[in-house]
Image (cartoon, helix red, strand yellow):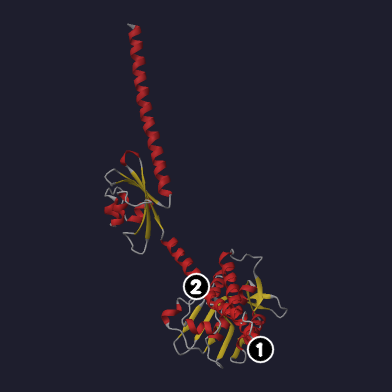
Amino acid sequence: MATTTRHSERAGLRRLLERLDGVFGSQRLGRELALLQRTFDAVPDGWMVLSDSGAVATENDAARRLLGMVRGDRRTLVEVARDPAVDSLIAGEVEDGIVEIASPMDESTRLELRHIRADGGQSIVLVRDVTTLNRLLTMRQDFIANVSHELRTPLTVIVGYLEALEDDDIDLDTMRRMLNRLHAPAERMKALVDDLLTLTRLESSPMPGPDDVEVVKVAAMVDSIVAEARQLAGAEHEFHIDVDSDLCVAGVPTELHSACFNLVANAIRYSPDGGPIHVRWRTSDEWARFEVEDAGQGIAAEHISRLTERFFRVDLADSRARGGTGLGLAIVKHVLRRHNSELRVASEVGAGSVFHFVLPAIATSESGTPQPV
């Protein structure tokens, strides 16, 4: 009798342990599933599991956000996306298993959906926002096309003259004239390459650190810029300079010089011959304001926001005739961005333009020591 009782107790204990193991095992499984879900929700790209009928079985936060779903939404992906391309994707009719659609939440947002078949009739769909990537690819394509176009014109001129120089009957005076005419397109190509290299360096370099920044004496820099500008303009423009003699700013000297010179050069190119150009760098409260004013033809309001785009020109033919590369204001934008500033433009058609930016001002004492304004 005692033996039977002990066997019964052991059997009961074993069943209890099995139940406890099942409970704890389920809890462990639940914790692991919760951890897995949190991990998937942290992924920036969307993912979802589809049943064999195409209904969404589970998804992460990113998929819900990109496709406008709510937790527990069990519609089919075709119903969610509202795009016939998704129907073809799920049916396996798309060769590489990838389609691009507009987000059902915002048509300007482009989504890439990648379909992966799994065992048991289920499948996985990865969802990625490719709006920014598409924009960058378009910018790169436009950039390459613009550079190719800008280089083609001077190259065509150079090649034409070189072919003419191969003529054995050409006289010495004609040869000299042709060689002299090669300088302009060659200089234009050099200017374009120089500006491209400058722009690439500005875009790819880290923000200036303490070792890069110096106290820049504004008056001396403006004198240097105006001297260069006079060479560019010849005797065709009248310069008016208004600069605080004791004003300094903190920045990368070569970059600030490049930005300011490009603004002055821009005014020269778009001002009529003999037109006045005002260059000012004055203190306003705690700020140093650099300003270039011209008496050119002015800029229509709809063009102002695009002025700092690479190769954007309001008048393409006129700009090329005046020697612009189409990159000067883009260089200005990136220099100012690296100095926590931005370019402002005020213009009216027929009334000229004013380009300006501000930086924190530093005044120098009588001993020449920089002092905060």
How far from the left and from the top, in percent, is residue 152? 53, 75
Quarter of the image for the N terminus: give it. top left
User: Which residue is found at the position 32% from the left and 38% from the top?
Assistant: 120
Residue type of the residue flagged with mark 2? Asn
54 and 58: which one is in front? 54
| Residue 361 in view here | no
Q: Amino acid at mark 1?
A: Asp
- Closer to us: 93 or 181: 181
In front of the other: 246 or 82: 82
User: Residue 209, can we see it?
Assistant: yes
Could you tell me if the residues under marks 2 and 1 are in contact, i.e. CB atoms within 8 Å? no
Q: Is residue 139 left or right of residue 55?
A: right
Say if 22 sits above or below 151 in the image.
above
Q: Quadrant of residue 334?
A: bottom right
Residue ID for mark 1: 173
Reading the image, the residue beneath label 2 is: 146
The residue lying toward the viewer, choosing from 107 and 139, is 139
- The image position of residue 43, as x and y in percent, is 43, 50
Mark 2: few, some, or many residues within 10 Å (few <14, many ≥20)? Answer: some
State the residue at coordinates (36%, 42%).
118
Closer to the chain start, of discs 2 and 1, is 2
Quick one: SS at disc 2? Answer: helix
Local crowd size for mark 1, using a 10 Å CA cut-off: few (<14), some (14–19), many (≥20): few
Who's the residue at 52% across and 72% down the image? 148
Tell me the SS state at disc 1.
Answer: helix
